[in-house]
Image (spheres, helix red, strand yellow):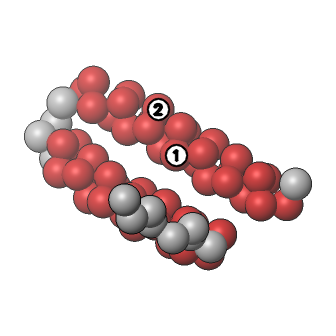
Amino acid sequence: MMTEPSLTETQRLERLEQQVAAITVRLAQLESAQAPVVADMTKSLFAAAEGATQNESLNHFQ
């Protein structure tokens, strides 16, 4: 069984940035549908993504 090589911190952060970019595009598409609930979800998702990114950065320095 092959295992995936360990990702460096930079690679992990780049992957997170790519995921956030993809989420951002999808959220923009959903927001354009004018669904008020989506706006609230967007704020929550961005807050969660920001927290996850901060946690990644904090973990790097621990």
The quarter of the picture where residue 22 lies is bottom left
Q: Are marks 2 and 1 in contact (CB under 8 Å)?
A: no
Q: Nearer the viewer, mark 2 or mark 1?
A: 1
Binning the other alpha carbons within 10 Å of mark 2 as few (below 14), some (14 to 19) or many (20 upward) gives few
- Residue 21: image location, x then y, percent: 37, 63
What is the C-alpha distance between the residues marked 2 and 1? Answer: 9 Å
Of all residues, the one furthest to the top in this rendering is: 37
- Residue 5: image location, x then y, percent: 51, 70
Q: Nearer the viewer, residue 5 or 55?
A: 5
| Local secondary structure at mark 2 | helix
Q: Is residue 14 left or right of residue 19?
A: right
| Local secondary structure at mark 1 | helix
Is residue 8 depicted above or below 21 in this figure?
Answer: below
The residue shown at (85%, 60%) is 61
Is residue 19 depicted above or below 5 in this figure?
Answer: above
Count the marks. 2
- Amino acid of disc 2: Ser
Q: Is residue 20 left or right of residue 14?
A: left
The residue shown at (16%, 36%) is 34
Q: Nearer the viewer, residue 35 or 53?
A: 53
Q: Quadrant of the N terminus?
A: bottom left
Q: Is residue 19 left or right of residue 59?
A: left
Binning the other alpha carbons within 10 Å of mark 1 as few (below 14), some (14 to 19) or many (20 upward) gives some
> Which of the numbered marks, if any, corresponds to residue 44?
2
Regarding residue 17, the answer to whether it shows in the image is: no
The quarter of the picture where residue 13 lies is bottom right
Which is nearer the N-term, disc 2 or disc 1? 2
- Amino acid of disc 1: Ala
Regarding residue 33, the answer to whether it shows in the image is: yes
Q: Nearer the viewer, residue 43 or 13?
A: 13
> Which of the numbered marks, if any, corresponds to residue 49?
1
Q: Quadrant of the C terminus?
A: bottom right
